[in-house]
Amino acid sequence: MSAIKETLTQPITLTDGAVKQLQLIREQQGLDPEHGLRVGVKGGGCSGFSYILGFDKQTEKDDTFEINGMKVLMEKSHAIYLLGIEIDWLNGLNNRGFSFNNPNASDTCGCGTSFSA
């Protein structure tokens, strides 16, 4: 009898630039391996929802993914808003910071940190 292995599809993409910056932040904050990258949404912002991006410990409400070597935590209820999102790191003259390319967003604000779905 063969064992059944459950595989969760990666809901988001982290670019190489984003992973490098996140690893740097993790090192600067001196976080232990139990902390994963929390990606989520919360109500607010000029378009209705704002993104959550930070290091946190896993809770019972989370799904956990390994994406580009990074442990990623996401509340199960947030997947509907984040499925397919790409998180990148911009380091240009006009923009510096994380950018969110969300195919589920029907509208985004000018600053790129909030959206409506």
Image (spheres, rainbow, N blue to C red):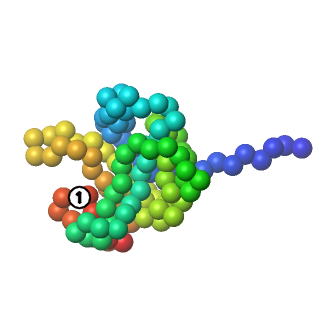
Q: Quadrant of the N terminus?
A: top right
Residue at x-position 21% and y-position 65%: 109
Residue at x-position 47% and y-position 62%: 78
Residue at x-position 27% and y-position 63%: 114
Residue 117: x %, y % from top left: 36, 72
Residue at x-position 42% and y-position 32%: 31
Pointer 1 residue: 112
Q: Is residue 6 left or right of residue 72?
A: right
Residue 106: x %, y % from top left: 32, 71
Dot 1 crowding, Cα within 10 Å, few <14, some 14–19, many 20+: some
Q: Is residue 70 visible?
A: yes
Q: Secondary structure at mark 1?
A: loop
Residue 13: x %, y % from top left: 42, 47
Q: Is residue 115 visible?
A: no
Q: Quadrant of residue 21?
A: top left
Q: Amino acid at mark 1?
A: Gly
Q: Is residue 66 above or below residue 105?
A: above
Q: Is residue 74 above or below residue 81?
A: above
Give the farthest residue toward the left: 93
Asked whether 52 or 83 is in front, the reply is: 52
